Image (cartoon, grey):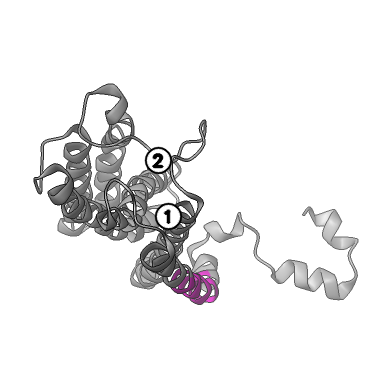
Amino acid sequence: MTTLDRAALPPGVRAHAAAAPTWRSLASPMRFEAWAGRALPWFAALAALLGVAGLVVAFGVAPTDHQQGDVYRILFIHVPAAWMSMFIYLVAALHAALGLVFRTRLSPLMARALAPTGALFTAIALWTGAMWGRPTWGAWWVWDARLTTELILLFLYLGYLGLVSAIDDPRRADRAGAIVLLAGVVDIPVIYFSVQWWSTLHQGASISLTAAPSMGHTMLAGLLLMTGACWAYTVAVALARVRRLIAEREAQWRLA
């Protein structure tokens, strides 16, 4: 909304429009911190609601698979965790790039806030994948292309977290961490397309934008509910973590 548009509004509406933050204004850490405090409980509640609904559908409503039996239910946790491990990395790398190029203050903090959750989901994906692989493949681990590249993703997360925590100067740490995140982005398409590029044990995608899902509607509903729960949880935890990071750096910004 432009200045002229605001002037044409009635006084009461004009005051509300002036107080309401725009998406651009949320680039300010102080404004974002206030907005995050209001949004955090909603995303936390949404994560809990979707998580409970997803678990009920996945483990109580969805039918037993005629080939894998009940062991396939691990995939209701494994698949969303694997999706989120890649998605969070891309978002964290985007924030890191914005901070590196445009010197935005909030972006490096968002990368730091997202990375621990991304590492958690990567570890969950690897762990649940091993649980599914033992009865299905007969082994806890195989050096399959997708498994190996997902393991590399975990090392990238841990390397980034270790690097930014080891450097005392926050600005130097943010720049070094951004380089690590951006260099590791190449691993994401390799993970995603590995089952198409190489002959692997890992099964292909059950959901595709170009084809109908290869699963029943109830199974699909459980998978989407669990994915939504993971996404809402990620947002809630990232908002809580970035508020703490903003508070830690506020004194530094005042002195800068």
**255, 185: nearer the viewer:** 185
In the rendered image, residue 196, in percent from the top left (x then y), is placed at: 31, 25
Residue 46, position as x, y percentages in the image = 50, 70
Q: Are marks 2 and 1 in contact (CB under 8 Å)?
A: yes
Quadrant position of residue 67: top left
- Residue at 40 percent of width and 40 percent of height: 206
Instruction: Give the prevailing secondary structure in the magenta stretch.
Output: helix
The quadrant in which residue 123 appears is bottom left
Among the 4 quarters of the image, the one containing residue 230: bottom left
Residue that mark 1 sits on: 223
Q: Tell me where residue 126 appears, x and y as whole percent.
A: 20, 51
Quick check: can you spot residue 217?
Answer: yes
Any magenta on residue 235?
no
Of residues 235 and 212, which is closer to you in this image?
Answer: 212
- Quarter of the image for the C terminus: give it: bottom left
Q: Position of residue 128 (x, y in %)?
A: 22, 55
Instruction: Judge the density around disc 1: few (<14), some (14-19), many (≥20) Cα neighbours within 10 Å.
Output: many
Which range is magenta?
Answer: 36-49
Give the CA distance from mark 2 to mark 1: 10 Å
Q: Which residue is mark 2?
A: 206
User: Observer-nearest residue: 163 or 113?
Assistant: 113
Q: Is residue 19 above or below residue 140?
A: below
Q: Is residue 48 magenta?
A: yes
Tell me which amino acid carries mark 1: Leu
